[in-house]
Image (spheres, rainbow, N blue to C red):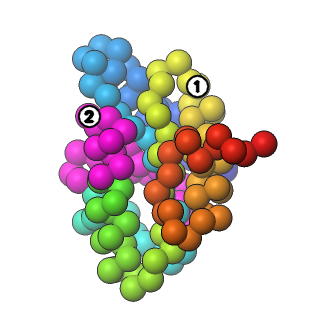
Amino acid sequence: MEDRIFNRLAIEIDRAYYTFKRYMAPSTFAFLYIEKELTPTQLGEFVRISDKFLEVDKNHYFINFVFTEQDGAFKASQNLILNLDIFFQDSVSCIAIDTFDASKSPRIVINRLHQILKETKKNPYSRIEDEDVLNGVV
């Protein structure tokens, strides 16, 4: 990952931590994987207006489900996957979700999301996973 991309993600994560500490407003972080190209404008049509997303590369987006705990982010992810399936006319997109923990550094959050996404891609039947998928990974 390019340094400039990592720095943008770190700023977004730190901003969410500040918002949580100051206002007790939760967030949930996610990584979206897509095989075909999708512009930020197109993705913006499928996510809630309150959600923030950053393009990592042509196949990955970082999403911050703002003001949303993990169960709400899971539901929003289900809706996003459904819309992407219809848009792309396939079923290969997947999402990794990590539990919000303000004690984790941005690097740890990003690394965990990468690990979760890697495991998620291995199972075509479960296209949205959280950190529980890492329990059996050595």
Is residue 96 shown above or below 135? below
Q: Position of residue 74 (x, y in %)?
A: 36, 49
Q: Position of residue 47 (x, y in %)?
A: 28, 58
Residue sitting farthest toward the left: 49
Q: In the rendered structure, which amino acid carries the disc numbered 2?
A: Phe
The image's mark for residue 105 is 1
The image's mark for residue 51 is none
Is residue 88 shown above or below 98? below
Q: In the rendered structure, which amino acid carries the disc numbered 1?
A: Ser
> In front: 8, or 63?
63
Residue at horizontal 33 percent and vertical 42 percent from the top:
71
Is residue 99 shown above or below 41? above
Residue sitting farthest toward the top: 22
Q: Local crowd at mark 1 within 10 Å, few (<14), some, or many (≥20)?
A: some
Q: Judge left or right: residue 23 versus residue 124.
A: left
Q: Position of residue 120 (x, y in %)?
A: 58, 58
Q: Position of residue 49 (x, y in %)?
A: 21, 51
> In front: 36, or 134?
134
Is residue 76 shown above or below 20? below
The image's mark for residue 67 is 2
For residue 78: magenta?
Answer: no
Residue at horizontal 32 percent and vertical 80 percent from the top:
86
Q: Earlier in the sequence, mark 2 or mark 1?
A: 2
Q: Which residues are magenta?
A: 48-75
Q: Local crowd at mark 2 within 10 Å, few (<14), some, or many (≥20)?
A: some
Element type at marker 2? Answer: loop
> In front: 6, or 24?
24
Question: Disc 2 vs disc 1: Cβ atoms closer than 8 Å?
Answer: no
Quarter of the C terminus within the rendering: top right
Residue at horizontal 56 percent and vertical 70 percent from the top:
124
Residue sitting farthest toward the right: 138
